[in-house]
Image (cartoon, rainbow, N blue to C red):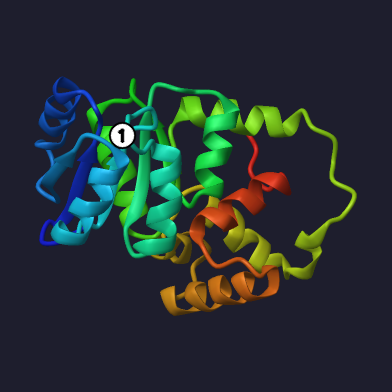
Amino acid sequence: MSSKTIIKVLLVDDHPLVLDGISARLEGSENLDVVGTAGNGQEALEKALELKPDVVLMDISMPVLNGLEASSRFRDEQPDVKVLILSMHDNREYIVKMIQNGAAGYVLKDVSSDELINAIETVFQGGTYFSAGASHTLFSQFADEAEPEAEPVNVLTRREETVLKLLAEGLCNKDVARQLNISVRTVETHRQNIKSKLNITTAAGLTRFAIEQKLITLT
């Protein structure tokens, strides 16, 4: 990622010490600029209107308006803002709900600073990101479930299915293009066709579909 691309980040957590700690961890990246902090989801929504962040890095358990509700409102009211969850909760209920509410990723608080920065950069570029712990909790439990009777993924071509899988794994358009040796414009066309065929409009929705169809598996 170019060092000239500055990603504006809004940090949201109800513990001031946690906010200070996260801010310090992000100082190692020249691509990130912490433009502000908020102590709950309502404050985050208000500050986002003023500060215009690219990514909101947000906890779930907060007073006034929690992360679950705030993510849904960001999706509806400020859809250009990417929401990345940073939480200590690694249970499937939280992770799935956050995806349904429009979050672009879910990272556990025990990740390294480098991984946290990578997660922010990934969702900023239009990808999705799940830390290893969140992925294991989510994907392994989906793998234990019975196969769905319907297989709507069949409406996609083989190439579209491959593109969807890579996007759901967190790759941005540029990375998908590089891996498949095709142009970024071709990836964008595939992405739009996938969304149209599946009637899905968000990156989080595509990720949820890929999980439900078991296109993503643990390695």
Left or right, residue 217 beside residue 115: right
Q: Classify 10 Å Cα crowding around label 1: few (below 14), some (14-19), many (20 and above).
A: some
| SS class, disc 1 | helix
Q: Nearer the viewer, residue 120 or 9?
A: 9
Image quadrant where residue 163 sits: bottom right
Left or right, residue 42 beside residue 144: left
Return the residue at label 1. 115
Q: Nearer the viewer, residue 178 or 62?
A: 62
Residue 194 higher or lower than 111, as above or below:
below
Image quadrant where residue 67 sits: top left
Residue 86 higher or lower than 74, as above or below:
above
Q: Residue at x 80, y 64 (%)?
A: 154
* Rendered location of residue 48, percent (x, y): 22, 55
* Rendered location of residue 38, percent (x, y): 19, 39
Q: Nearer the viewer, residue 205 or 126?
A: 205
Q: Residue at x 29, y 41 (%)?
A: 57
Residue 61 higher or lower than 103, as above or below:
above
Q: Quadrant of the C terminus?
A: top right
Q: Quadrant of the N terminus?
A: bottom left
Image quadrant where residue 29 sits: top left
* Rendered location of residue 68, percent (x, y): 45, 40
Q: Nearer the viewer, residue 111 or 39?
A: 39
Amino acid at circle 1: Glu
Visible residue check, residue 78:
yes
